[in-house]
Every structure is written in C-alpha cells, then in structure tokens.
Amino acid sequence: MEKNNPVSILFWGRVKIEYAASYFTFAKGSKFQKLIHKLKYHNQQNIGIELGKHLGIQLKKSDYFKDIDLVVPVPLHPKKKKIRGFNQAEVVADGIAISIKVPVEAENLYRSVHTQSQTKKNKLERWQNVDNIFKLKDINQFANKHILLVDDVVTTGSTLEACAQAILQADSAKVSIATLAYA
C-alpha cells in the first residue's frame, strides 16, 4: 500500500489523516458494486464481514497500519440503522478487527443529526449535509489513540472528513481511514 494513493490524496488540505486506503476501485456494474449493493440493501452482512477480513489482511501487511488502537465505523443515525437493521460500516469494521486483532468501538462516535442520503448529492451538497453532525460521547476515550475510521465506500470523502474532525478533537488522537471501495 502506497502512502500517497488516490484515497489519501482526497483528504490533503482538508483534514489531518495519517494514512488512507481502499480495498478496490468502485466501478458501476462491477462484481464489487453488486457485492456492496447486496451488503447494504439486501442485509447480507456476511459479505461485509468477509470483505472486511480481506481488507484487514492487506492492512496488516502495511507498516502504515501497524499501530492502530481502535477500529471505528462511520456511524449511522439511529433512525437509519433501525430502517436498515444494521450499519454496513460496522460490519466491515468487525471483519477488519478480526484480521488485525484490534477492538471495534462503535458507540463513542455518533451521528447527531439524521441527514438525507448522500448518493445523489454533489461535492458541496455532501459536505453541507454532514458538516458538524458527528460528535464524541467521551472525548477522552480517543485521546492518545490511533483510530482506524472505516466505511464501505468513499466518494468525495465528506462524511469521513467530518468524522475525522470529530475524532481529532480528542487530545493527541490520530486518524487513518480504510474503506472497501473508492468511487
């Protein structure tokens, strides 16, 4: 895994990220798109766990991800989680955690506002949709920790950027990012 990959470059000048990586590039109509769609919309959580395990194996091979303390999924608002029945980022995080042998912390970072889906929004609308909506319940829980922030797909990076900004409020916290796909 290269340090200056397209996913890392996405965050340059926006928020301080240690490292960022995606398992594959998202292409419309690809097998990976179908897998992500089954994970998100057809409750096939096993897909997320398995892909997360494979991503975790790749992260484990990289020196950039050796000192991760906690795996933190991008949170869904409770309303959205109730509708979907689960958080796909949390399922992926569970798979990664199995491979890298680091605990998942899915409660401290939370989404304080229920927002509309990002899928049909442009870059500015995506940022406005998530600006300042992520919070920490206990800021000290992430102090002096290297957090691996996990999501299924990164597009513009707005959601991950907003999450990272919330995490970085903790004293001496560091954030790296891992996603299944880069679109």
Image: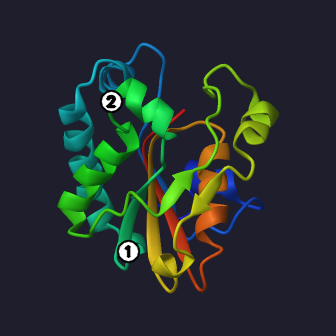
The residue located at (79%, 39%) in the rendering is: 128
Q: Is residue 125 left or right of residue 82?
A: right
Residue count near mark 2 (Cα–Cα under 10 Å), binned few <14, some 14–19, many ≥20:
few
For marks 1 and 2, the one nearer the N-term is: 1
Q: Residue 148 falls in which quadrant of the image?
A: bottom left
Report the disc number at residue 149: none
Q: Kindly identify the amino acid type of the residue bearing the numbered disc 1.
A: Ile
Q: Kindly identify the amino acid type of the residue bearing the numbered disc 2.
A: Gly
Q: Quadrant of the N terminus?
A: bottom left
The residue located at (48%, 17%) in the rendering is: 28
> Does any portion of residue 157 appear in the rendered image?
no
Report the disc number at residue 85: 2
Q: Quadrant of the C terminus?
A: top right
Rendered position, 136 above or below 159? below
The percent coordinates of residue 90 (x first, y second) are: 35, 47
Question: Contact, CB < 8 Å: mark 1 with mark 2?
Answer: no
- Disc 1 and disc 2: Cα gap in Å? 28 Å
The percent coordinates of residue 175 (x first, y second) are: 53, 69
Q: Is residue 45 left or right of residue 117?
A: left
Rendered position, 145 above or below 116? below
